[in-house]
Image (cartoon, rainbow, N blue to C red):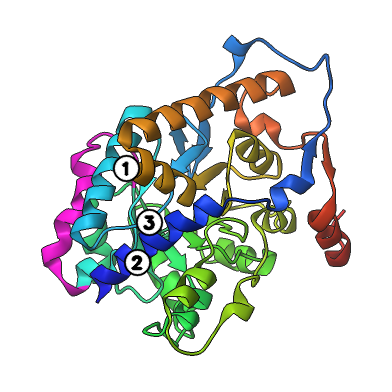
Amino acid sequence: MIASRKDDHVRHAVSQQRDGGPNDFDSVTFIHHALAGIDGDDVSLAVDVAGKRWETPLFINGMTGGSQHTGDINRQLAIAARETGIPIASGSMSAFFRDPSVADTFRVLREENPHGFVMANVNATATLDEVRRAIDLLEADALQIHLNAVQEIVMPEGDRSFGSWPQQIERITEHTSVPVIVKEVGFGLSRPTVTWLRDAGVAVADVGGRGGTNFARIENDRRTTADFSFLVDWGQSTANCLVDCAGVTGIDLFASGGIRSPLDIARALALGANATGVAGRFLETLVSQGTEALIEMIRTWLDQLRQILTVLGAPTPADLAGSDLLITGEVDTFCRLRGID
Ligand code: FNR
């Protein structure tokens, strides 16, 4: 059951990417200052994340594992991460907790990428023992906990009990040896949620907003009964989440959900993210064109991001915070209605 769901998710997510389209990052424009540029050699893409140094502000976000097909995908993603030096996350490891025979479909992330930064991924009901098994299997450097209540309610076989999540996040954070990242899967984290996560000791909040892979649509397309299509616009876009969380201190922010280009990475960093995650866009390239094409794409993106920083006069990604930005459209409306300057 889980294995076929994982294959379904890949198929639907890939076909969504083919549709492509605009999102709220289009409402974020850098004001161009023609004399602001610096020398390309003076730019470094390195960032600090949860007290560790990453060579790039870009990672492959949690997607898959749990079936033979998705194990193959994880192997290819891990090779791409290794060859480009970017961090990578596993998909939800619930399938492994239920059936240890699928361990290899996750373990490939470490086998193919022995020295890379690898993140394990669990849901917010995982027990401490499951968390330990997930981290051990991947020799994980960090743990992602995903929040996906909207996906669960649209999924016919989904969970319907979310009341224990806050307490379990606190428990996991307290007892886990590696940094904990809490992420949404495309519906966004609000400022009160991020502030709560900070107070619970979570190291990183990945705002995981609307604008990219849409799990309300994916689960609705998988259903044969009861239409949930009224939920496909639920949640805050990634750009809106970032402006909502501006100025929250004591927790690092990741941006994911609808990152389509190096310019979107720069926009997210300028809006306060420490790093950005990509899932659907990379998956589509991998599935339709293969591992070499994905490696080439990631290298090109990093090179182009370096050039954007050069033009903007930002020696590091952190220097993009406070960039001169023009905010229009939906993001401007969101700021005004939420009273954000
Ligand atoms: C995901 N995502 C995801 N997230 C998570 O925490 N655990 C998971 O198991 C999965 N599974 C999964 C499968 C597939 C096929 C995709 C494309 C994505 C969500 C992912 O990490 C990310 O939050 C969203 O996809 C939004 O980012 P993009 O796709 O717009 O870059």
Mark number displayed over residue 63:
3
Under 8 Å from ligand 1: the CB of mark 3? yes
- Secondary structure beneath dot 1 equals helix
> Which residue is at a point 38% across and 64% down the rendered structure image?
9
Q: Residues within 10 Å of mark 2 (few under 14, many from 20)?
A: some
Rendered position, 138 above or below 169: above
Residue 1 placement, left or right of 273: left
User: Hey, what amino acid is under mark 2?
Assistant: Asp
Q: Residues within 10 Å of mark 3 (few under 14, many from 20)?
A: many
Q: Quadrant of the N terminus?
A: bottom left
Q: Which residue is mark 1?
A: 77
Residue 126 placement, left or right of 225: left
> Which residue is at a point 20% across and 47% down the rendered structure image?
108
Tell me, yes or no, whether the highlighted magenta stretch contains residue 108.
yes
CA separation, marks 3 and 1? 10 Å
User: Hey, what amino acid is under mark 3?
Assistant: Met
Mark number displayed over residue 160:
none
3 or 1: tag closer to the N-terminus: 3
Mark number displayed over residue 8:
2
- Kindly check if marks 1 and 2 are in contact, taking CB atoms under 8 A apart as contact: no
CA separation, marks 1 and 2? 18 Å
Residue 106 seen anywhere in this rendered image of the structure: no
User: Hey, what amino acid is under mark 1?
Assistant: Leu
3 or 2: tag closer to the N-terminus: 2
- Secondary structure beneath dot 3 equals loop
CA separation, marks 3 and 2? 12 Å
